[in-house]
Structure formats: C-alpha cells, structure tokens
C-alpha cells in the first residue's frame, strides 16, 4: 500500500510540471458546470450545482480514469523489454 501511495504522490507532483493538464481540468469543470442547466430537468432531489455532489462525481471519475490507466501500465512495466521485443 505504501508503494501505491508513493506512486500517487509522484503522479501528483508531475502535474506541477504540466500546467496544461490543470488548465484542461479547470476548463472541463467550468464546461460541466454550464451543462448542469441542461441536466436540471433530469435531476431529482439534488441541486444541479450542488458542490459536494459535483466534486464527488468529478473525483470519482478521475480516480476511475487514473486506475484504468495506471493498472495496465504497471503490468506492462513488469515485463522485461527484451522479452517483449523478441516476442514480436
């Protein structure tokens, strides 16, 4: 578990070197905030701009995307490069 925490911290530190990702995230959140007016008719019992729900869903989707890309990359990193190249 410590290795996972270390990997996550390293990835978050890498975002500082790539401000484009942060800008894209902020723009996407702003766009999503604007789309909430369209989706307001579908929601029941939740305000379209409820910050807790909005940020929770954004964090959940971000976590799923991170795991979906990190797990295969970790598995691929365990394969010896010479073995993989000889198999082709």
Image (tube, rainbow, N blue to C red):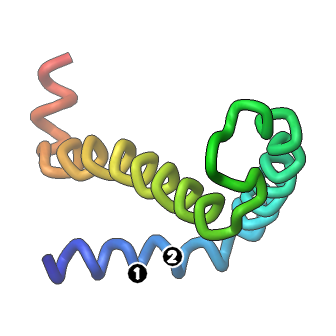
Q: Locate the C terminus by quadrant.
A: top left
Give the alpha-carbon distance from disc 1 to disc 2, as whole Å.
Answer: 5 Å
Q: Residue at x 40, y 49 (%)?
A: 64
Q: Nearer the viewer, residue 57 or 43?
A: 43
* Mark 1 vs 2: CB contact within 8 A: yes
Location of residue 53 by image quarter? bottom right
Relative to 32, residue 25 above or below = below
In this rendered view, identify the residue nearer to me: 43 or 67: 43
Task: Decide which of 80, 60 is in the foreground and name it.
Answer: 60
Question: Which structural element holds mark 1?
Answer: helix
> Where is 76 relative to 60, above or below?
above
Give how far across and how far down residue 30 sits, in percent: 85, 56
Is 31 left, or right, of 63 in this rendering? right
Give the residue drawn at x 18%, y 45%. 75
User: In the rendered image, which residue does mark 1 sit on?
Assistant: 9
The extreme front residue here reads 45
Give the total number of marks visible in the rendering: 2
Query: On the rendered structure, is 69 left or right of 12?
Result: left
Q: Residue at x 70, y 31 (%)?
A: 42
Q: Quadrant of residue 18?
A: bottom right
Mark 2 lies on residue: 12
Left or right relative to 69: residue 33: right
Residue 12 coordinates in the image, percent (x, y):
51, 76
What residue do we see at 77% from left, 58% from top?
49
Q: Is residue 15 above or below residue 77?
A: below
User: Which labelled disc corresponds to residue 79?
Assistant: none
Image location (x, y in percent) of residue 34: 89, 47
Q: Residue 50, how many percent across, how many down? A: 70, 63
- Foreground pick, 83 / 16: 16
User: Local crowd at mark 1 within 10 Å, few (<14), some, or many (≥20)?
Assistant: few
Image quarter hosting the N terminus: bottom left
């Amino acid at each position: 578990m410590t290795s996972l925490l270390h990997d996550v911290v390293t990835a978050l530190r890498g975002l500082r070197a790539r401000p484009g990702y942060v800008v894209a995230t902020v723009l996407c959140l702003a766009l999503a905030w604007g789309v909430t007016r369209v989706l307001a008719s579908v929601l029941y019992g939740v305000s379209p701009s409820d910050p807790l729900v909005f940020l929770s869903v954004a964090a959940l989707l971000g976590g799923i995307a991170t795991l979906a890309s990190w797990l295969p990359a970790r598995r691929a990193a365990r394969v010896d490069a010479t073995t993989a190249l000889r198999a082709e």
